[in-house]
Image: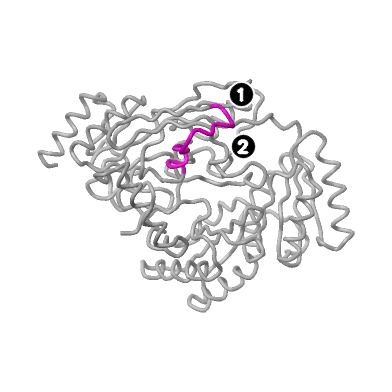
């Protein structure tokens, strides 16, 4: 460790406390990489501030010394956004955790950035409310990371993406300036909406420390069905019918046969007598949801829109539907690549066909499967090539993202850009847009210490 680095660490320890600065063997491997497993380097130090003031002090010191800092949350991201490079310090928000307040009248929750999403959900539920942000990684991901990547999840069709559920925000700039914008009002039309700069910026413009999140009344009931369909056009028609006829529609999750068959077999769950070309989970929320969902399914079955349907009769059956959808068994595949794209809903079927054909033309033995939220135009692609090398992984990205560009889509729907999609950002954003992003970055972080090398292409 250089004398300059030692000096910075000593200064940080005096400001934050010895236990808030980890170095050498104190740094665990979990600080090397997010869930993409693409990180190669441990940070030189891990800073663990326990207050907003400590975050500000840490950034002020690092900025003065031009020391790069990589914010880290629950490390569940899949784009390399929290991966440190050699020489970076990591700023972990895990000690800045807890629910500060639930305001029943305003229907808001004020929560610290390091709070696990599931902990915040449970606190809201205990108070009789629903925190509508929901992801499969809810037990590990943190609120700050959810906001920094503008995570989507399975309830977007009813409740919007993460940014739609944020009323107020607190963030610390690179120079230690604290912007406290903990607004609780739905209407606040007072000039530039600064909170939106930090949501989705992946820690490149500032470090989110607290947020005011919108809550909703806790649903009094829930009903879940699994439908079998023959074509993607049928999936679209089913979605349109569900949006018109099911007032409590909260989730609409589609699985192509390639995905549904693999994950159901891997979990040893048999749901239909024969495997459908498409399987869709429909979930509704509100009082007395079972009867409306049953009536809806009878109607679409009678019209020939679906081939079969199962209604969960217990929480165990409901969980079996979602276990297949969450697809944790995919992690067993070698060199798994998780791709997350967004296209116009009507184009998703044709895109999936073209994407499958293009990938298998290059990698004939590859596992390629598709699933998505559909109602919010989000498609996930799982690709596994046995013994894939770095050049193979790059080629997979190139094939998929060029195809996304040809369809006029987005290379990232909800996983962010990080490092893994950085070089493809121009496939979805115009040069003029990228230039404005660079100007904003330069204005808020002139020395480029915050999460360098992430999001923006060189």
Q: Camera-side residue: 387 or 401?
A: 401
The count of marks equals 2
Say which mark, if any, is on residue 228: none
Q: Camera-side residue: 257 or 61?
A: 61
Relative to residue 154, is residue 384 drawn left or right? left
What secondary structure predominates along the stretch shown in magenta? loop
Above or below, comparing residue 274 to residue 154 in the picture: below
The N terminus sits in image quarter: top left
Task: Measuring from the top left, give residue 331's x and y in whole percent.
Answer: 50, 55
| Residue sitting at x 55%, y 61% | 381
Q: Which of the 4 quarters of the picture holds residue 19?
A: top left
Provide the residue span drawn in magenta.
184-199
Q: Which of the 4 quarters of the picture holds residue 90?
A: top left
Task: Measuring from the top left, give residue 51's x and y in whole percent.
Answer: 36, 24
Q: Secondary structure at mark 1?
A: loop
In the rendered image, residue 248 lying in the magenta stretch gets the answer no
Query: Which residue has dot 2 on it?
Result: 132
| Residue sitting at x 23%, y 37% | 63
In the rendered image, residue 198 lying in the magenta stretch gets the answer yes
Q: Secondary structure at mark 2?
A: loop
The CA distance from mark 2 to mark 1 is 16 Å
| Residue sitting at x 28%, y 41% | 69
């Amino acid at each position: 460790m250089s004398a300059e680095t030692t000096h910075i660490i000593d200064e940080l320890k005096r400001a934050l406390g010895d236990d808030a600065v980890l170095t050498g063997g104190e740094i665990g491997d979990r600080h090397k990489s997010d869930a993409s497993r693409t990180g190669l380097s441990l940070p030189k130090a891990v800073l663990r501030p326990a207050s907003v003031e400590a975050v500000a002090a840490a950034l002020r010191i690092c900025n003065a010394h031009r020391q790069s800092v990589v914010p880290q949350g629950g490390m569940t991201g899949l784009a390399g956004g929290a991966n440190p490079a050699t020489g970076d310090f990591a700023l972990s928000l895990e000690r800045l955790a807890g629910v500060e307040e639930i305001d029943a009248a305003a229907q808001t929750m004020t929560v610290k950035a390091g709070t696990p999403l599931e902990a915040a959900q449970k606190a809201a539920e205990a108070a009789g409310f629903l925190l509508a942000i929901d992801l499969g990684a809810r037990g590990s991901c943190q609120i700050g990371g959810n906001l920094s990547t503008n995570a989507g999840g399975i309830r977007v069709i009813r409740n919007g993406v993460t940014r739609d559920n944020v009323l107020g925000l607190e963030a610390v700039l690179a120079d230690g300036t604290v912007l406290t914008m903990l607004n609780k009002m739905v209407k606040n039309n007072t000039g530039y909406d600064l909170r939106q700069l930090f949501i989705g910026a992946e820690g490149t413009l500032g470090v989110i420390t607290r947020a005011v999140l919108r809550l909703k009344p806790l649903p009094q009931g829930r009903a879940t069905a699994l439908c079998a369909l023959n074509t993607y056009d049928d999936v679209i028609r089913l979605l349109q019918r569900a949006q018109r006829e099911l007032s409590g529609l909260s989730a609409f999750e589609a699985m192509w046969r390639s995905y549904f068959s693999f994950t159901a077999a891997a979990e040893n769950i048999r749901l239909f007598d024969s495997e459908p070309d498409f399987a869709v989970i429909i979930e509704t929320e509100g009082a007395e949801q079972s009867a409306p969902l049953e009536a809806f399914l009878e109607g679409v079955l009678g019209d020939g829109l679906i081939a079969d349907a199962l209604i969960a009769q217990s929480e165990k059956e409901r969980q079996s539907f979602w276990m297949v959808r969450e697809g944790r068994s995919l992690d067993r595949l070698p060199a798994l690549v998780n791709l997350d794209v967004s296209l116009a809903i009507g184009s998703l079927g044709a895109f999936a066909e073209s994407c499958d054909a293009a990938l298998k033309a290059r990698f004939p033995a590859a596992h390629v499967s598709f699933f998505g939220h559909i109602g919010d135009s989000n498609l996930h692609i799982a690709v596994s090539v046995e013994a894939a090398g770095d050049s193979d992984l790059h080629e997979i990205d190139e094939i998929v993202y060029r195809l996304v560009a040809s369809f006029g889509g987005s290379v990232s729907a909800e996983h962010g850009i990080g490092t893994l999609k950085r070089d493809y950002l121009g496939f979805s954003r115009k040069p003029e847009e990228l230039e404005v992003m660079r100007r904003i970055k330069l204005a808020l972080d002139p020395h480029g210490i915050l999460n360098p090398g992430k999001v923006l292409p060189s």
